[in-house]
Image (tube, coloured by chain):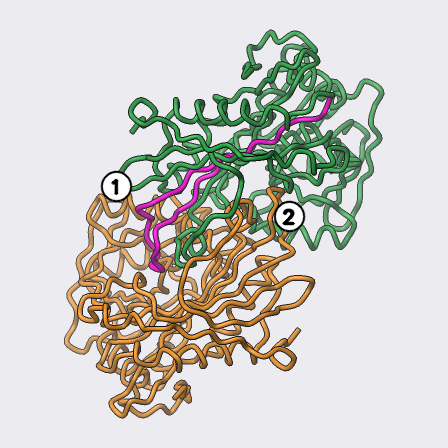
Chain colours: A orange, B green
């Protein structure tokens, strides 16, 4: 299945770069794409024709299965440029492993390791001018796979397309995030696809998230679907709770994404001698801790925003406000993570991966 | 939002039909498309540019949200030609209402009623030669909506495309269907999107269905995700159980699709003075009834196969075989439904809708 040994990548460069037309000080996240993209098709039981070509439209049948059955998965990663002009990725092996885990759950063939890394590094090198230095700047990388067989019958596709798009991103300041703890809608089922970065998991959250936004909250913290008793994740990020000086987060499961930032935060916390308790966290514990003052912080962890401090949560229409403490864990983790990502700080964990 | 009053449909006919190249005796379901398709875009807050044009590829950005977030819904319907050459639809208002219900749950704008019917009937009339008469033959109709805004950030799309494809279909004989009752994987969560025909619901079932196929079973009967105690639906069809002379089926919920064939079967049964019990059905009841001989039939109900008799089910690796009784409900319902659909029998329910 590893086509990299047998098939040479076809590389088609842009005639002239679009980079001059881009205002790098006013980027909307994920909507401006770099000059090139990677594309590789699965047919006749093998990944073939790996190609880097200018970013542009696909010509695809409206009968392709991705449009009808949501057989699609993705990943989110970032490349960072340091002050010496070197370019780094953050734990890319984790994303590689996860996209194949997601693919397996969605009955999509796995993608070969070496070809993934060859595509990723070649693409980033070709578009290296699109990676801007400066803390918080990055090139957002979106590997994804979609079902391309033409046919409106509900069965796994025989054909797929693996792609990588890249999009320059600025420091992503979310502002203070206010969240609602879900007590009616749910993100995923036991035995469902919640642990996969499956496309449909995201579209399914838009409506309940819109309802939260109408009430002045930006995100939803999802809970278990049977009783809404346990805190799970926030859909685009995992969630951490600091009660007194202990950091709590839910264990990963078939409902919760195994976030790369999540596991990095756990390692950072342990390295900082902070008590980390990975266990099911009750909504009632959170409410109780908010009431008695032991709830110090809530924050989200994910690739896009790295760490997002939560300033308030709502549960059953009661709003609990949080004041960030002076010794904020979230501020410390965000700085330590970003310093590693941008090659400013030490990396005792071996998380940085040099591209160029 | 109803654009049909203000915008005339743009109709582009094929120069020459592909119909002569199609072997109507050897059709694979859903993979041969008729000459024309309908397309309508949502942008700037309105559905616009309704167009019927030759079936063909779309030119679409790989950054379109449908590929990344599965924000897409669909419907399945059929057109039938009777022996006088008249063409009929079956309860199309139900599909219209359901696609908008699905859209709402997936944060997709609803589609206008009159434009839906204008598009549907104009398209079927233009491709009327593709609808073959004969019991079981039909033109399968696939309305669907996809998110087309370009952007790899997880938020609802601003732009959408509504389309209708049609595909000639033969009598769909599934053979004897053997099913596995789910006891690990699940289809949907309480408060999730199971009641919507959301694209991702289907892709999510492919992997567990593959596991069932490897054991010699074609479909999975899904159960509730918390305890796998209650029988729900089979993913592409609703499920009925006949215990002695009573017909049982689960009530619709936010986990179970409100199937058009399902509700038609319930009406047919009542009209035939058959006791229908719409209530949560326990897996343990089914097993018990299979053991004591009171389980007479299991069948699926859905648009593609109309009625699919189940010849065996497996639960926790024990297989229970079923022998179709002489007075089979499924055979009777299938005949009555098909007679109505093909304008052979009386239609006391007002289900037929004349297109041409």
Residue named by callout 2: A155
In which quadrant of the rendered image does the C terminus of chain B lie? Answer: top right
Rounded to the nearest angstrom, the CA distance separating label 2 from label 1 is 35 Å
Secondary structure under tag 1 reads loop
Q: Chain of mark 1?
A: B
Horizontal and vertical percent for residue A204? 42, 47
Residue A230: which quarter of the image?
A: bottom left
Q: Does B31 sit above or below residue B298? A: below
Residue at 66% of width from left, 67% of height from top? A46
Who is closer to the viewer here, A136 or A8? A8
Residue at 20% of width from left, 75% of height from top? A328
Residue span colored magenta:
B135-164
Horizontal and vertical percent for residue A132? 26, 79
Residue named by callout 1: B44
Residue A306: which quarter of the image?
A: bottom left
Who is closer to the viewer here, A83 or A75? A83
Q: Does B225 sit above or below residue B276? A: below
Whether residue A160 sits left or right of residue B25 in the image: it is left
Near mark 1 (Cα within 10 A), the count class, few <14, some 14-19 or many ≥20, is few
Whether residue A274 sits left or right of residue A162 in the image: it is left
Horizontal and vertical percent for residue A339? 27, 85
Are the numbered discs 2 and 1 placed on the same chain, yes or no?
Answer: no
- Residue B147 lies within the magenta run: yes
Whether residue A146 sits left or right of residue A154 in the image: it is left
Horizontal and vertical percent for residue A219? 29, 54
Q: Does A172 sit above or below residue B263? A: below
């Amino acid at each position: 299945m590893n086509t990299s040994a047998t098939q040479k990548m076809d590389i088609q460069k842009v005639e002239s770069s679009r980079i001059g037309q881009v205002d790098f000080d006013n980027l909307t996240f994920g909507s401006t794409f770099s000059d090139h993209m990677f594309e590789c098709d699965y047919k006749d039981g093998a990944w073939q024709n790996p190609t880097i070509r200018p970013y542009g439209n696909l010509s695809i049948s409206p009968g392709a299965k991705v449009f009808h059955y949501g057989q699609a998965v993705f990943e989110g990663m970032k490349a960072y440029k340091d002050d010496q002009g070197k370019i780094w990725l953050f734990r890319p092996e984790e994303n590689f492993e996860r996209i194949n885990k997601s693919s397996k759950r969605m009955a999509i063939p796995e993608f070969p390791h070496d070809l993934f890394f060859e595509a990723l590094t070649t693409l980033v090198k070709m578009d290296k001018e699109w990676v801007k230095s400066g803390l918080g700047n990055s090139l957002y990388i979106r590997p994804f796979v979609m079902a391309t067989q033409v046919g409106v019958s509900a069965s796994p596709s025989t054909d797929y397309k693996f792609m990588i798009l890249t999009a320059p991103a600025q420091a992503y300041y979310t502002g203070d995030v206010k969240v609602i703890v879900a007590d009616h809608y749910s993100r995923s089922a036991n035995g469902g696809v919640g642990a996969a970065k499956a496309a449909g998991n995201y579209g399914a959250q838009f409506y309940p998230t819109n309802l939260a936004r109408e009430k002045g909250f930006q995100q939803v913290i999802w809970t278990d679907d049977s009783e809404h008793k346990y805190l799970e994740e926030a859909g685009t990020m995992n969630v951490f709770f600091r009660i007194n000086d202990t950091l709590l987060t839910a264990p990963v499961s078939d409902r919760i994404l195994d976030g790369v930032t999540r596991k990095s935060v756990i390692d950072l916390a342990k390295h900082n001698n902070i008590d980390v308790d990975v266990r099911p966290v009750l909504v009632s514990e959170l409410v109780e801790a908010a009431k008695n003052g032991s709830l110090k912080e809530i924050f989200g962890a994910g690739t896009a925003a790295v760490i997002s401090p939560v300033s308030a949560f709502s549960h059953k229409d009661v709003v609990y406000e949080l004041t960030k403490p002076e010794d904020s864990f979230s501020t410390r983790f965000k700085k330590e993570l970003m310093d590693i990502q941008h090659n400013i700080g030490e990396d005792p964990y071996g998380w940085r991966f040099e591209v160029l």
